[in-house]
Amino acid sequence: MILFATLSLLLCIMCDALKVQQFSDEILNKSILELEMRELLGIGQSAKRLKRQMPLKNSAAKFLLEVYNIVEEHETENVQQSSLWLSNKRSKRSMRGSNFLTELDVMEIAKCNTIITFPSKPFSTTTNGDFNIVFATNRVSNDLQLVHSVLRVYQQPNDDKIMQNLSKQPATVFVYQETLDQTFKILSSINTTIAYKGWLEFDITETLHKWLKQKSEHYLDLKIAVNIRRENRTKGGLEISAQDLGLIMPYSDEEETFDFQPFIIAYFNGPELLQKIQKLRTKRNIPMKRNIAVALPSNWKSAMCKRHDFVIDFEDLNMGEWIIAPKRYEAYFCAGECSFPLNMQTDATNHAIVQNLMNIKRPSLPKPCCTPVLLSSIKILHYDINENAVLTKFANSIVKGCGCN
């Protein structure tokens, strides 16, 4: 009796120890999973936890949210003619300007897998009538290759009578930097008129590329100047302040200007998801534990190969405050039997059909496996470690169809 009681107690202790070990493994693997997901999105292990999600107040974040919403709608509708589709969407757009999202943006979005927007920093100032704009571009991942970058500044027609008299005069807006020897280097320019209303876009790809290559810890500092070409002058022009032209100041406490503040859009191409994961694991030298997989329910095994529901919820990964959209999404997974005879619903390859036939003759040969045969990408809009809005596209992330292979 004492021996039975002792054995029972020992068995209970072993069971409890096993449960504790399984629970510890689950916590460890969940922590590793959360860490890898944070690093994949450029948030990083050392990033401070946000108490709550930041409101989308500035033009930079709102631009990417509009990109996300329109691209998602575009893919859902499967529209082929992007120009017609884009012009139709403009009629429904907010007051942020008819050229807030352009056809060039749509083309760049299709070519790149990462878009980062950099809002102008609060301490941007004006000097001698020129705008001085500062951006935090100093913590972009080395894995990202810059493809294209633009600076956007909004022009609002000036109500001043003197400026209205010049409304038809052409003007040139310059973006420049002050060098160490106190000379000026013009980076980009664009022609406009005093009466124009909308976003001015400057190509700063070369400038940003050089800046990122330097890996400088300082902020990127750009200046804006304006020159009006007078019709009655053969040479030169009239210099006016950027504010007189109607350019929205880089920083203002006025809430109505939040949608119009200057920002940078940078289009990047980064490594594929698998490459990033392998690099992260090699860097940390922590292999993902294999015992987190649980056995599939018997009804999944006995059923024919098909797609099953599988939801990714960022709140469960303690990342809800970093993710703008989507908060959760259906990733799906494939499971089920690939048994003889394979029907049309299993979407089997010729190789799988032959392998299935050979399995009947030689049972030692494994049956075909139920795997994804059609996948689509997922776009995730999130903040990075600098609290910049980032839109990242992960290819082959959602199962659209399953088959036997």
Image (cartoon, grey):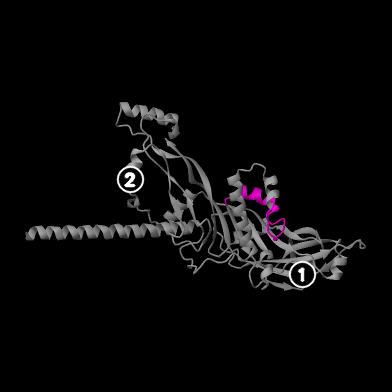
- Measured from the top left, where is residue 219 in percent x and y? 62, 67
User: Residue visible at 54% across and 62% down?
Assistant: 384
Helix, strand or loop under label 2? loop
In terms of sequence position, does the residue under pointer 1 or pointer 2 come before the other?
Answer: 1
| Image-quadrant location for residue 21 | bottom left
Q: Position of 214 compared to 28: left or right? A: right
Queried whether the magenta region covers residue 62, the answer comes back as no
| Residue 109, visible in the rendered structure | yes
- Measured from the top left, where is residue 333 in percent x and y? 43, 45
Type of amino acid at the residue the image marks with label 2: Pro
Q: Position of 225 compared to 94: left or right? A: right
Q: Nearer the viewer, residue 316 or 14?
A: 316
Q: Which mark is residue 213?
A: none
Q: Position of 267 compared to 174: left or right? A: left
Queried whether the magenta region covers residue 103, the answer comes back as yes
| Residue 181, visible in the rendered structure | no
- Measured from the top left, where is residue 89 in percent x and y? 67, 51
User: Residue visible at 49% across and 69% down?
Assistant: 51
Crowd band around label 1 with a 10 angstrom C-alpha radius: few (<14), some (14–19), many (20+): some
Type of amino acid at the residue the image marks with label 1: Gln
Helix, strand or loop under label 1? helix
Q: Which residues are drawn in magenta?
A: 90-113
Residue that badge 1 annotates = 243
Residue that badge 2 annotates = 297
Task: Tell me: residue 248, above or below residue 300.
Answer: below
- Measured from the top left, where is residue 226 in percent x and y? 79, 65
